[in-house]
Image (cartoon, helix red, strand yellow):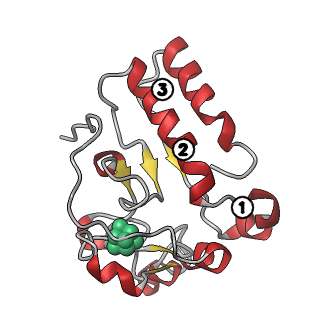
Amino acid sequence: MTGINYKNLPRLTRFVTGNFGVDSCHIISTHYIGAANKNRSRLRIDNKEQLPYVEAALRAFYGSVARPAFNLLSNYLPCLLPGRENVMSDWKYPELDDDLFLPGAAHRDRMYHMITEDLRMKAPSCRACVYNRACAGFEKEYFALYGADEFKPLKSRPAPLGPGPVYF
Ligand code: SF4
């Protein structure tokens, strides 16, 4: 999802699920690293602007597919889309199986070297969130662009809004 393509996502999701038997999609919020960071003046998009389109794409997906084959969202957070946690990946601490919050020293010279614990941060208000112990937080570069006002602590775990994948 970037500032260039985000408005097309619901239509694209409806098109691929309705016409090609697609059984999962993977929507990744921009990581402001590498080329995306260099071009961020063109690609940037805040969550407030893009989330209605993400939610519309999820509704379009469930209009054609009963249960996704794998997680639908990457680099989003429970506080941004409450009730969609069961289709989110890449938001937890590593011991909870998140590859976006890795110990940097262990990944020097590997493709993950940019995606380490150096990438992320939390806000003081996160301490009040029901997911604080699991959540690895948001990206520092995102914070530099937009601040932390969008990340509102959740007081309780919301019920899932749709079925999640079943992993064996
Ligand atoms: S801990 Fe913070 S960043 Fe994580 S879901 Fe809660 S409010 Fe959002």
**Quick check: marks 3 and 1 in contact, CB under 8 Å?**
no
Res. 142 visible in picture: yes
Q: Is residue 28 left or right of residue 61?
A: right
Q: Amino acid at mark 2?
A: Pro
Q: Amino acid at mark 3?
A: Ala
Residue positioned 60% across, 50% down in the render: 50
How far across and how far down the image is residue 86, in percent?
Answer: 28, 47
How far across and how far down the image is residue 33, in percent?
Answer: 65, 70
The residue carrying mark 1 is 44
The one of 61 and 103 positioned closer to us in this rendering:
61
Q: Amino acid at mark 1?
A: Arg
Disc 1, SS: loop
The residue carrying mark 2 is 52
**Image height check: is 78 above or below 107?**
above
Which numbered marker is on residue 86? Answer: none
Frontmost of labels 2 and 1 is: 2
The residue carrying mark 3 is 60
Q: Is residue 51 left or right of residue 141?
A: left
